[in-house]
Image: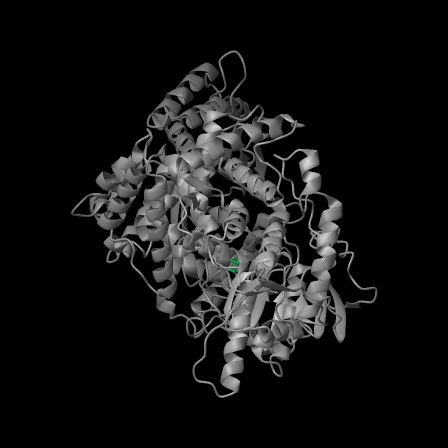
Amino acid sequence: MTYSDNESLQKAILGKFRPSTLILTSGERLARQLKHRFRLSQMAVGETAWAMPQIMSLNAWLHKTWKMAWPEYRPLNHLSRLVIWQEAVNLSPPPPPIDWEGDMSLLESLDESYAVLVRHEIAPEGRGEPYTTLSTWRQKVCQNFERLASIQRAFHPAHLPDCVKKIIQRDEIPIPKQIVLAAFEAPSPIEEKLFDVLAHKASVCRLDLPTGKPCRIRAVILPDRDQEVKWLVEQVTLDAQHIPLNGIGVIVPDLELYLPYLRNTLNEVIGPSLVDNYSAFNISLGEPLSHQSLVLAGLLPLRLATEGEPRQVLLSLLLSPYYGRWAEVRDQIARADRIWRENSVDANIDHLLRVAASRDPNLFYLIEGAPERLSNVYAPLRTRSARRVPDWINILERFWNELGFPVIADQIDTSSWKYLKDILLIFKKDLRKISLTLYQFHEWLKYALARETIHTQGSEHAGIQIVGLIESRGLSFEKVYVLGLAGTTLPRPVRPLPLLDPEERGKVQGGTPESQFSFAKDAFQHLLACAPDVTLIRPEQEGGEPLSPSPFWPDSQESRTVDLWNEPNGVWSRIVWLSSAYEGMKQGEHVAPCDPPLESSYLPRTISVSELAIALACPFRFLMEKIINIQPLEQVEYGVHPKVFGSYIHRLLGLFGRSLCEQGLDESVDQEGLQEFLKVCVDQMIRNVAQNPQWSVELRRWLGERDKTPGLLDQWLRIEIERLRKGWKWLKVESSFSGLSFPDWPFSVSGRIDRIDYHPDKGIVVWDYKTGEIPSKKSVTTDLIEPQIPLYILALKEHKVAGITQNRLEDRTFSGGYISLKKWSSISHQDYTPEKETWEVVLKRWQEVVSDLGKLVAAGQYPAEPYPVSRTDKKEKPCEYCPYRPLCNPLLRT
Ligand code: SF4
């Protein structure tokens, strides 16, 4: 019998209901929708109590019927099957190149192949000549599996239709007189045989899925998947104004692919449910248990032990709200991360705890806790040898108990905890005889948790229904959207099934392109029967590559786009961040992040040259970093951090230079003697780090290798000696200055000059050593963004440098620049004397720029604006790597 759509099919199915009728459906979802429909129909005619018809999925009925027969053999659950597969593979290891290391995907592949073959009545253990090495091996492993299962008086559930068929044939159980087989789209051969036997024993009526001819069908193409989902959500929100929510269906052939897009956009526009299970939408695909926060927190000790005890995982454990032990002290413990980062300690609990203890003993005691210390509870997880699975579970549970896990926050946590405990119980029972290393146990547990899904929001009977292709069989809605109808979605690619030989693949559904196409063709026609109004949607491209449409895509289509910023409609105003952004943009004008102005008393009286450079680059950053003192967390650096290295070099050259200045360094110097002395200084500087392999590499770069390659410092010294021979003298090394100020500066500036040189004809030059990139001359003299050298010269001219007497400066010319120490080939002295003007003119400009900045900050204004007073056009530069970006408002700067 055929029907025009699923609505009439469902009515016809329920129309067959008599007290002795059994209604079997292809899937659970249809069975539940039929029961709900029946309930509503009874209430509509004023009934208050009724006998519920026997409606169930074929799978549920098979299990129930088998149980009723008091059988000696039981169908195996998934986990027990994997255990037996593992044993079976251990008995017959796979041929090369398959690497058998307890690989779960191999076990899963065997289980899937076995089920597919049984459903198609092909013997998995082989009755003919196998074609390939893999299928020969599979046959052997399947024989092992059947033997091992039989020893346990169990069997693979794929055999259930056949087992039930046999007990019905032998009249070992009674079956209803009337049976309705509803919506079986593509029953497997083993199911067809069962249906034949049922037809001999009872009156069987088959109601097949209709081929749909909707009143309205529309095809819409959008630029990509993100736009597809946005457009869909816009449409369903508009539909919801005149269609009951549960009358709107969204069928997604590749639901897993679209799940993140759907969840994000629906939650943003429609919002999460306020009351459990009363969400305005229901996504049938649950979330894997392994994604739940409580479960992720519960597995942290296993991750810690199997991933090499990384700092981040230990910190996640200590700061996790699911562990009650540290609830009161979590904010104090968070400081440990700063210590670890500053000390570049990134793994190993012993090391991490030692460093924490050396810097802050109290912190160490907070982390270790009481009564049982963290390191004691954790110690059993460090065992490398294999243990029985129940032992690992006991260790894990003890860890949880001692550390107060779990602290439950809401309903989702409650059900996650229940499912997690259930899975551990199953593990204890089904894997009780198995010994695994901790790594293997972790893998098995992760695998089981990823397969278990939980439903976190929504109901099947209320809200917009979002379902996959198979689940949509027989469902009825007022309006349906089909999402993602691209060429790779319907039909799906051929199932890989690598353990089947080509002949076997030719016989199973989905094993060839032809069978996938024929399945997809039927499925497409059946989904058109889900509603009288159907909208098909597909993306035009993915990652810049065009996507072909499904072969069932209609000829005429509409192109749509969603432009939230330029063409918003009422739907999008539901998104909080978007409406706030619009509000912000309407205000238009710059909003100072520090409004009202900061009291001038907060401005330091003295700032260093490097702080002045920060304030020039961005006053807001100066406010955050230097006044409020918010510092970005250090990143753990592998190798020698360039900053640390730069500071060592500065100290080394300072030590070397000071000693030589004291000895009155001049052109009569002995080069070899200086080199030896430099090495002595180097040894003194790096004594504490010389054993570190990363430092030894750096040292080789700096000192070179005897008779092989000259070092960077050798080259530098050679150039310096040449300069000394040309009449230069090192006047002062590491000279501090302070109190540099002018009448309209609200602060004074202090600093330290790396070196001051003197030449009788050329005057005085201030130098700064640079181990990294040196600033350009333009940035110093014209753009006015690099204050170092000009301020040093100003300090000298204003007699602010300690140890330089006034008479040494009289009638001298002044200049300054950088000594580049970045690489051997580019070591040089870069004098930044301006080309077409004098330093006096440049220094005057600098005085004005600092004064402009001073006025701004003295008025309490710290705008998030790069270079507000400098003369540069490269304004965006300071924002490129600025750690304060999340604190300032980038929108205001565009
Ligand atoms: S991102 Fe740019 S504007 Fe914002 S604080 Fe950093 S430098 Fe200033």
Q: Nearer the viewer, residue 181 or 861?
A: 181
Residue 676 lies, in percent from the top left, at: 41, 17
Image quadrant in which the N terminus is located: bottom right
Q: Is residue 754 above or below residue 1?
A: above
Image quadrant in which the C terminus is located: bottom right
Residue 730 lies, in percent from the top left, at: 45, 31
**Residue plotted at (56% across, 52% down):** 880
Q: Is residue 150 above or below residue 240?
A: above
The colour scheme is: one colour
Q: Is residue 472 visible?
A: no
Q: Is residue 877 visible?
A: yes
Image position of 437 (left or right of 198): left
Q: Nearer the viewer, residue 667 or 132?
A: 132
Q: Is residue 894 above or below residue 834?
A: below
Image position of 4 (left or right of 165): right
Q: How many marks?
A: 0
**Residue plotted at (39% across, 34% down):** 651
Within the image, what quadrant is residue 410 found in? bottom left
Q: Nearer the viewer, residue 879 or 58?
A: 58
User: Given the current orientation, which residue lies at the most extreme top position?
Assistant: 707
Image position of 723 (left or right of 218): left
User: Given the current orientation, which residue lies at the most extreme left position?
Assistant: 371
Q: Is residue 484 above or below residue 597?
A: above
Residue 273 lies, in percent from the top left, at: 46, 72
Image position of 139 (left or right of 344): right
Within the image, what quadrant is residue 830 found in? top right
User: Given the current orientation, which residue lies at the most extreme right position?
Assistant: 555
Residue 522 lies, in percent from the top left, at: 72, 58
